[in-house]
Amino acid sequence: MFIWTRYLGSATLAALLLTGCGSTTDEFTEEQQEDSVKEENENHSSHGDNGNIGKNNKVRLMEQNLQYTSNGKVKEKTAFLKKSDNQPFSLYVLQQFKLSAEEPGKDIVFLTEDDSIYMRIELLREDVNWDEVEENVQAQLKSLSETIKEPALNVENDTGFEVESGDDVITSILLKDEKAPVRLTMFTKKDKDYRDAFLEMAKTLLKE
C-alpha cells in the first residue's frame, strides 16, 4: 500500500471524495479481490517479451505511445503496460506516472514528481445503476463547490463533471462501457493540467 503525503487544499476534500465513493464499489470489492492479478506491477519486460495475453486472449504490446494535451501543449510520450494487483485490469501508464493500489477496489495513477496530481480508478459492476452513480458524484462535488461544469475533455459518449476549489481541479469521469464500467476521479491543478493525459491512459484500460 502506498503511503500518501499529498495535500489537496484541505483534509475535508480528500475525505469526502474517498468516503463517498464506497457506496458504488463495496459490493464489487470481494469479487475483485478474488480475481485480482497477482503479478508485480512495477516490472515490465524490455527484452525478449513482445506482448502480454490477458484472460480475453487479446495480445497487448508492452508499450505504446500516447498523445495528450497539457496546459495547451500537445505532447506524445511512451506508455508502458501495467497490471493492477488490486483490481482485475491492465492499462498503459505514461512514463512520468505510476500505478499503485490505494485501498481494496481503488487504484490510483499519480504523477511521480508530485503525488497530489493523480487519478483514482474504480471498476464498477456491469449492472451498475448509472443514475445513482451520477447522483452520488454530483453530491460529493457539490460539497466542494456549488458550481459543477462539464470538463473540457473528449469524453465522447461518457459522462463528466468538474469543480474547482482554489487552485485544485476535481474531475469525475464515468466510462460507460457495458463490459467494463469505470469511475474515474482526477485531482489536478490549474497550472498542472494532466486531465487529458489521465483520460488517454484510462481509455487503454482493459478488464481481465
Image (cartoon, grey):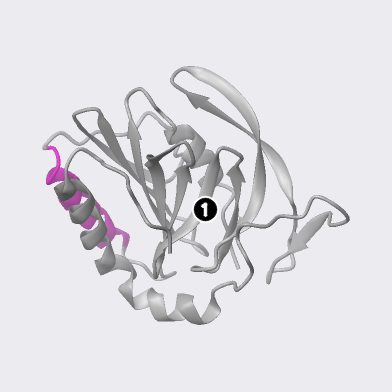
Asked whether, in this view, residue 80 is left or right of residue 181, the answer is right
Q: Nearer the viewer, residue 176 or 38?
A: 38
Q: Is residue 63 above or below residue 27?
A: above
Where does the image place residue 2, in percent across and percent down from the top left?
A: 42, 58
- Give the SS element for disc 1: strand
Mark 1 sits on what residue?
99
The quarter holding residue 89 reads bottom right
- Residue 148 shown in magenta: no
Q: Residue at x 84, y 57 (%)?
A: 49
Q: What segment carries the magenta color?
A: 130-145
Q: Is residue 180 visible in this depiction of the protein?
A: yes
Q: Residue at x 17, y 48 (%)?
A: 11
Name the residue type under label 1.
Leu
Asked whether, in this view, residue 77 is left or right of residue 48, the answer is left
Q: How many marks?
A: 1
Q: Residue at x 42, y 35 (%)?
A: 195
Q: Nearer the viewer, residue 156 or 147?
A: 147
The quarter holding residue 127 reads bottom left
Where does the image place residue 205, in percent across and percent down from the top left?
A: 56, 54
Where does the image place residue 20, in percent across and percent down from the top left?
A: 21, 60
Pointer 1 local density, CA inside 10 Å: few below 14, some 14–19, many at least 20:
many
Q: Residue at x 44, y 69 (%)?
A: 126
Q: Nearer the viewer, residue 146 or 77?
A: 77
